[in-house]
Image (cartoon, rainbow, N blue to C red):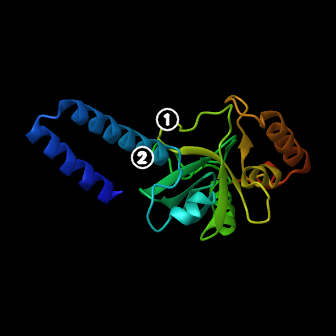
Amino acid sequence: MANNFNFLGREILRMIKKKEYGQLALALCVLLIIVLAQQLLVETGQPAGGATADLLSSGRMTIHRVLDGDTFAYMGADGERIVRLLGVNSPETKDPRKPVECFGRESAEFLKQMLQGQNVRLEKDPKARNIDKYGRELRYAYLDDGRMVNKLLLEYGYAQATPEYPFTLSEEFVMLEDEAKNSGRGLWNEDACRQ
């Protein structure tokens, strides 16, 4: 990519010196298209080149840090990318304005044990926003064995469904939460949040 920019830069300077304005306009359009395409690739989480391109192009990301029970990070071609699991909300552990919520540490530890250092496949939802208001990618995450992490959090009672936000699997997620509640799993266990 850097070689392409160097070449275009030299050509643009040559055209300016020779007053080849028609070709200059064309070269600037090509440069703009390259820059916009690069930005689009970065924003959509697709490979932008470099050592991580093979992993990213396969749709698999290595999780290098779990932030809490529904948020983790991977290294993209442009640096660390934060992912918020779509359709679920685990009890808070990181909000500086609030105390750690009941079952928050357990949820965070569950996600850490499941994901830290693992490869996952990330998937967007066509009905959901791509990025949340904090700049985090909103995604479904799949383990190597094909199980969806978002669903596992609900099934084991480590998170609640968020049907107030539009996403394709909303009804299924609410059913999974209801099953965990009815079975008393995780945060739904009557003893889970006793002080």
Snapshot quadrant of residue 126? top right
Is residue 189 in view? no
Which of labels 2 and 1 is toward the front? 2
Q: Which label belongs to residue 133?
A: 1
Which of the marked residues, 2 or 1, is nearer the chain's N terminus? 2
Q: Which of these two is toward me, 49 or 115?
A: 49
Q: So how many labels did they put on this image? A: 2
The x, y position of residue 163, in whole percent, is: 73, 32
Q: Which label belongs to residue 30?
A: none
Label 1 near label 2: C-beta < 8 Å?
Answer: no
134 relative to 193, above or below: above
Query: How far apart are the two marked residues, 2 and 1, measured between alpha carbons?
Result: 23 Å
Q: Residues within 10 Å of mark 2 (few under 14, many from 20)?
A: some
114 relative to 122, above or below: below
SS type, badge 2: helix
- Looking at the image, the residue that sits furthest to the bottom is 117
Q: Which of these two is toward me, 35 or 17?
A: 17
The x, y position of residue 92, in whole percent, is: 59, 48
Q: Residues within 10 Å of mark 1 (few under 14, many from 20)?
A: few
72 relative to 87, above or below: below
- Looking at the image, the residue that sits furthest to the left is 17
Q: Which residue is mark 2?
A: 38
| Quarter placement of the C terminus | bottom right
Q: Is residue 19 left or right of residue 139?
A: left
SS type, badge 1: loop
Snapshot quadrant of residue 62? bottom right
Type of residue at label 2?
Gln
Q: Which of these two is toward me, 90 or 125?
A: 125
Type of residue at label 1?
Lys
What residue appears at the point 71 percent right and 33 percent down from the top-left corner?
Answer: 167
| Quarter placement of the N terminus | bottom left
